[in-house]
Amino acid sequence: MADKLNYKVGMIGALDMLRFKNMPKVREKAIQAASSAPLPKTLTTNEKAKQRHPEKQEVIVAEIRQNGADAKTIVLKTEDGSALAPFRAGQYISVCVPIGGTVTTRSYSLCSSPAWTKRGEYNITVKRDDAGFVSPYIQDHWVVGQHVTISGPQGHLYYERLRDAKKVVALAGGSGITPFMGMAYAIRDGFEDFDLTILFGSRTEDGIVYKKELDEVCAACDKVHVVHVLSDEEKPGYEHGFITAELIKKYGGEEYSVFMCGPQAMYNFLDGEIAKLGLRRKFVRRELFGMIKDPWNQPGYPEDIRGKTFNLKVIQCGREYDITASADEPLLTSIERTGIVAPSRCRSGECSWCRSKLISGKVFVPEKTDGRRRADIEFGYIHPCASFPMSDIVLDVPNSTLK
Ligand code: FES
């Protein structure tokens, strides 16, 4: 046997040597036969990559629909009907919103089918938060026909066959249904292949967003199921109360992944419930946590800085700006207030888009939104969207492409 193997290895080795010997001649021939036309300025693969992962895209508001009591669904389309960048159901886009002298961004999950990108359409849903800065502005000022700059799709809340269980139990609260609406459409339209059961928490039946659309998808596709959980109403055909470990177990079955999207209070509650289920870590996935509005409630927050302000020197492309930063809000918010346009996407400390060099000073980074790589921590980089000043700060901020 060993002799036979040696014989074969010997033969293969000799053939390889022969091929190697002939290689210069073969190459010479190929070079002589090549076209003398100059190479294209950009390579096709680079062009394709740019189309699939653009830094920014230009769209217009094609339609605005009221969706439930306090949410509006906004249909964004390319002006000429050309395709938008493709996305995995569950991903989000960052929307550039100039308000007065401020340019800020907000991320919104894509709640449309990936199939509609070919006709140049994305849908997002904006829930009104009267205490917020951006959502009331969008709801009150955006009109059909206006131009909007958006990012390419991004985010990690999508189905991955190699990682996730064949069945996904999606836990949604209020407008947190949006990524799962996209997943439901994607399954119906053949872009994804997994079983999706959505436990959808709303206060009342009237307050359910996307009720009609969800009913339609469930009727058309037996892989999508929706269980409505009403907290303020008891009605036949609906679960009552909150989404608990018992409820997840009831609809989960043997093996399942849990995906979550909703307000921060919901995540805080569900973290405890999910811990009771003993699921493997890879089977629990969560959408962006969002900007932390109450850093003083986060573990490790130094109480003595609450309410204080600090000097913040922003260096951007060689220019210096001296501004004031509040210890109660992320550095990114203080920067944007002054009209400086800083890069941002997720605003949750996860995407690294706002990554900036901390030249001097100290910041508090809540554990929940500390998505920095170990090397970045070591070399003094921070995410201003998830960092709160603890002293005077000097920060080198990159330029923004989304403006
Ligand atoms: S915007 Fe994503 S990490 Fe700051």
Image (cartoon, rainbow, N blue to C red):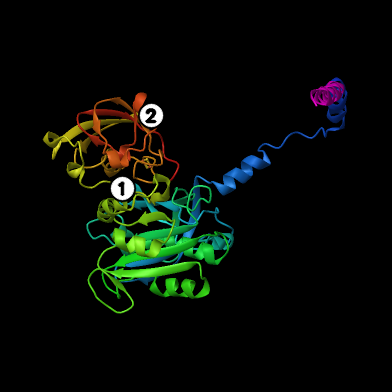
The answer to if 6 sits in the magenta stretch is: yes
User: Can I make out residue 332 in this image?
Assistant: no
Residue placed furthest toward the bottom:
236
User: What amino acid is labelled 1 in the image?
Assistant: Gly
SS at circle 1: loop
Q: Quadrant of residue 370?
A: top left
223 and 152: which is toward the camera? 223
SS at circle 2: helix
In the image, residue 183 above or below residue 98:
below
Which quadrant would the N terminus be assigned to in this image?
top right
382 and 213: which is toward the camera? 213
The residue where tag 1 is placed is: 101
Q: Main secondary structure of the magenta part?
A: helix
The residue where tag 2 is placed is: 374
Q: Judge left or right: residue 39 versus residue 94.
A: right
User: Can I make out residue 260 in this image?
Assistant: yes
Give coordinates of residue 44: x percent, y percent: 67, 42
